[in-house]
Amino acid sequence: MADLTRRVGLTVDQVEALATAGAFDCFGLSRRTALWAAGAVAADHPGQLNVTAYDESSTPPLPTMSEAEQLVADLWATGIT
């Protein structure tokens, strides 16, 4: 997630929208875990030293989203359900 964000130069809003839509599920991150990390990950920009701003072990245990919460998250992030 951090590498993708740095290489593409995504903003915090863009990373949050991708996390909310479940785009980081393929990396083994739940939507809530990815949202938790979005701000720290988006603070890393190309040209900066490769310093880890986010450590997955520091994420608190977060409950997975229910189907209704996923529906709302999809609608917010993509405009479709």
Image: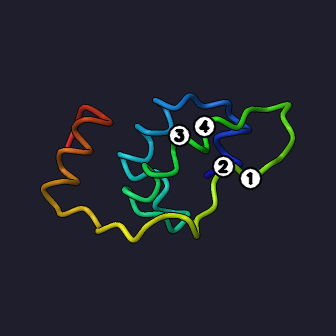
Amino acid type, callout 1: Thr
Question: Circle 3 sits in a helix, a strand or a loop, which is it?
Answer: helix
Q: Quadrant of residue 61?
A: bottom left
Q: Is residue 5 left or right of residue 18?
A: right
The residue where tag 1 is placed is 52
Determine which residue is flagged by label 2: 2
Horizontal and vertical percent for residue 5? 64, 40
Q: Does residue 62 lie above or below 20 as drawn?
A: below
Closer to the N terminus: mark 2 or mark 1? Answer: 2
Q: Earlier in the sequence, mark 2 or mark 4?
A: 2
Q: Which residue is under mark 3?
A: 39
Residue 11: percent from left, percent from top: 56, 28
Residue type beneath disc 3: Gly
Report the front residue among 31 and 75: 31
> Which residue is the site of mark 4?
42
- Mark closer to the chain start, 1 or 4: 4
